[in-house]
Image: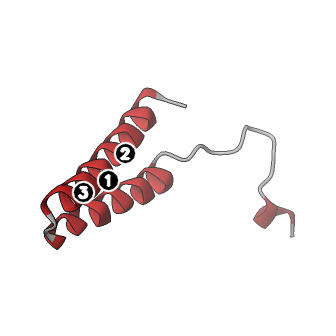
Amino acid sequence: MSGVLKAAWGLTVFVILVGILGWALSGRAVFAVFIVLGVLTGGAALVAFRTAPPAGRTTPEERT
């Protein structure tokens, strides 16, 4: 796992925790936005930083 991917996951966890704690401690639903943004950040990290298969290996789509 690369350093950039670790940073993205760290940011994701931080934003989601801030949202959960803010909502729980204040009772204001506006903190749900933090949770949504955290989930979107995690999804973007999965898409943007996924690794390609090693050279010489084919993906399942290429085999058919």
At a point 34% along the width and 55% down the height, the residue shown is 41
Q: Residues within 10 Å of mark 3 (few under 14, many from 20)?
A: many
The residue lying toward the viewer, choosing from 43 and 34, is 34
Q: Is 10 positioned to the left or the right of 2 in the image? A: left
Q: Which residue is mark 1?
A: 16
At a point 18% along the width and 56% down the height, the residue shown is 25
* Amino acid type for the residue under numbered disc 3: Gly
Asked whether the residues under the numbered discs 1 and 2 touch, taking CB atoms below 8 Å apart as contact, a structural biologist would say yes
Q: Is 21 positioned to the left or the right of 56 in the image? A: left
Asked whether the residues under the numbered discs 3 and 1 touch, taking CB atoms below 8 Å apart as contact, a structural biologist would say yes
Q: Is 1 positioned to the left or the right of 30 in the image? A: right
**For the residues marked 3 and 2, what is the alpha-carbon distance in whole angstroms?**
10 Å
Q: Quadrant of residue 1?
A: top right
| Horizontal and vertical percent position of residue 46 | 49, 53
Q: Quadrant of residue 9?
A: top left
Q: Which residue is mark 2?
A: 13
